[in-house]
Amino acid sequence: MRTQKMNKNSKFYYKNEQIRVENMFVVGSKGEKLGLMGKEQALILAQQENKDLILIAPNAEPPVAKIIEFGKFLYSQQKKEKMTKQKELKEVRISYNIGDHDLEVKLNHLKKFLVKGHHVRLVMILRGRENMFRNEALEKMKKIALSVDAKIEVPAKIEGNNISVQLTPQLI
């Protein structure tokens, strides 16, 4: 019998009597390590605190269980998942001979990504004879990166026919 609603993206967690492991490493409700103990003893500790025993790492050796309220645990897992999605890497591509207005439009897109909390990779593509001007293109890329109000995570570097710089949102 399932007590947790399942959808495509959710992970199933065993809790309380659903746990089939006999011995496990138990972490307390305040994060303290209670040590290796049997299932029955861990369930008694969880019931004394009016909380659930949740198997959080079934494949570990020994398996790890935590005493916590199941609703709070699911909420924190969803919050962590949302934060990892938010830090997704976005890419903005420009060319060496980009016009002023086109560059302005691309930089506005870049700034919107940064405001939303994404990491942004700005890539300048060099085609054909533009490769002769690599040093000028590298300097141009550095100026563009400095003009944006962001922290430079990976400085401008040449990778084949591309010059890239990685930016992260500025912490206020």
Image: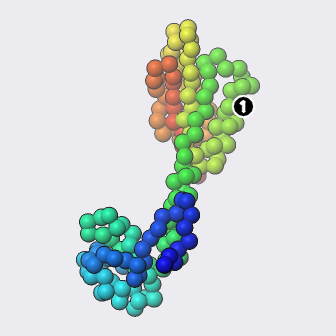
> Toward which corner of the image does residue 52 lie, by quadrant?
bottom left
Q: What residue is rendered at 37% in x and 77% in y?
A: 19
- The residue at 54%/42% (across/down) is 89
Q: Does residue 69 appear in the picture of this structure?
A: yes
Residue 124 lies in quadrant:
top right
Going by the picture, which residue comes out furthest to the front? 1
Vertical relation: 86 (above or below) 54: above
Residue that protrudes farthest toward the bottom in the picture: 48
Asked if residue 79 shows in the view, the reply is no
The residue labelled by disc 1 is 105
Residue 148 placement (x, y as % from top left) = 62, 36
User: Of residues 63 and 1, which is closer to you in this image?
Assistant: 1
| Residue appearing at x 26%, y 66% in the figure | 61
Q: Nearer the viewer, residue 82 or 139?
A: 82
Using residue 125 as the reference point, say whether residue 153 is left or right of it.
left
Q: Amino acid at mark 1?
A: Val
Q: Horizontal and vertical percent for residue 28? A: 36, 79
Residue 107 spot, x, y in % from top left: 67, 33
Measured as percent of width and height from the top left, residue 3 is found at 51, 78
Q: Residue at x 42, y 74 (%)?
A: 14
Give the vertical position of 144 relative to 137 (above or below).
Answer: below
